[in-house]
Amino acid sequence: MKRLWIAGAVLLAVLSSVLVMSVCSHTGEPDCRCLFCIMNAPAGESGLTYNRYLPLISGLWAAILLVSFYALARWWNRRSGG
């Protein structure tokens, strides 16, 4: 169970550091690739609308998977008597 908490803490630290670095790296140039510019850029002719929300969707899926693994591990420990 301790390993699961450590893995969750590492995942949270990595995701939060990537988010902070992306937000803080705004250059103000037209080709800026920070999270704020990606989310607010209008979709081009060939770009799909969901592409700018891909980091948000990926983070939500990672959180859903982490919570699911935690719940499964907790259920398994209770079931096995540990």
Image (spheres, rainbow, N blue to C red):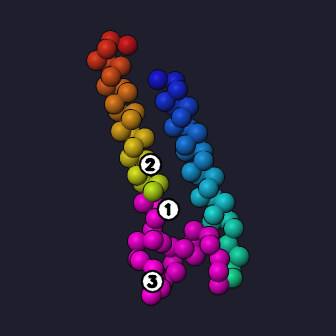
* Residue 72 horizontal/vertical position (percent): 34, 30
Q: CA distance from mark 3 to mark 1?
A: 19 Å
Q: Earlier in the sequence, mark 2 or mark 1?
A: 1
Say if 37 sits above or below 82 in the image. Answer: below
Residue drawn where x is 47% and y is 23% of the image: 1
Secondary structure under badge 2? helix
Q: Nearer the viewer, residue 51 or 59?
A: 51
The residue identified by callout 3 is 46
Q: Is residue 65 left or right of residue 39?
A: left
The residue identified by callout 2 is 62
Which residues are drawn in magenta?
Answer: 30-57
Q: CA distance from mark 2 to mark 3?
A: 27 Å
Q: CA distance from mark 2 to mark 1?
A: 11 Å
Q: Is residue 40 left or right of residue 34?
A: left
Question: As shown in the figure, which amino acid type bears the numbered disc 1?
Answer: Pro
Secondary structure under badge 1? helix
Examine the image and state in which quarter residue 81 appears: top left
* Residue 74 horizontal/vertical position (percent): 36, 26
Residue drawn where x is 39% and y is 43% of the image: 65
Residue drawn where x is 56% and y is 51% of the image: 15
Examine the image and state in which quarter residue 78 appears: top left
The residue identified by callout 1 is 55
Residue drawn where x is 58% and y is 39% of the image: 10
